[in-house]
């Protein structure tokens, strides 16, 4: 199969002269460079203050964030 150019205007990407299945896979993989990625918001870590109550600490431990009290 002859070399295939990216169909996006202004893009100069061209595949090599390879088998049709490989060329198709290369063009599909290349199109990911033209699609904007989804913005992922950071997840806030759970926090607890030193002045927290025992109930808050118990909830914090049950949340799966930690299993034991930090050592100073």
Image: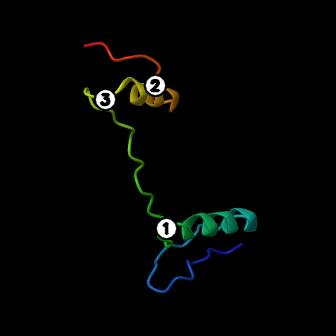
> Would residue 3 be found to the left or right of residue 38 on screen?
right
Label ID, residue 58 = 2
Q: Quadrant of residue 69?
A: top left
> Would residue 11 be found to the left or right of residue 47 on screen?
right
Quick one: label 3, few (<14), some, or many (20+) residues within 10 Å? few
> Which residue is most to the top?
71
Nearer to me, 8 or 18: 8
Find residue 31 and report its horizontal and vertical position in percent: 56, 70
Residue drawn at x 54%, y 66% as measured from the top left? 32
Alpha carbon of mark 3 to alpha carbon of mark 1: how far? 48 Å
Quick one: label 2, few (<14), some, or many (20+) residues within 10 Å? few
Sequence-wise, which precedes: disc 3 or disc 1? 1
User: Element type at marker 3?
Assistant: loop
Q: Is residue 46 above or below residue 25?
A: above
Say which of marks 1 and 2 sits in front: 2
Q: Is residue 45 above or below residue 12?
A: above
Question: On the image, numbered disc 3 is attached to which residue?
Answer: 52
Alpha carbon of mark 2 to alpha carbon of mark 3: how far? 10 Å
Residue drawn at x 49%, y 67% as measured from the top left? 33
């Amino acid at each position: 199969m002859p070399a295939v150019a990216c169909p996006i205007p202004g893009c100069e990407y061209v595949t090599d002269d390879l088998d049709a299945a490989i060329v198709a896979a290369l063009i599909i993989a290349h199109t990911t460079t033209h699609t904007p990625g989804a913005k992922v918001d950071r997840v806030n870590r759970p926090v607890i203050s030193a002045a927290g109550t025992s109930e808050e600490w118990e909830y914090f431990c049950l949340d799966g964030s930690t299993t034991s009290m930090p050592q100073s």
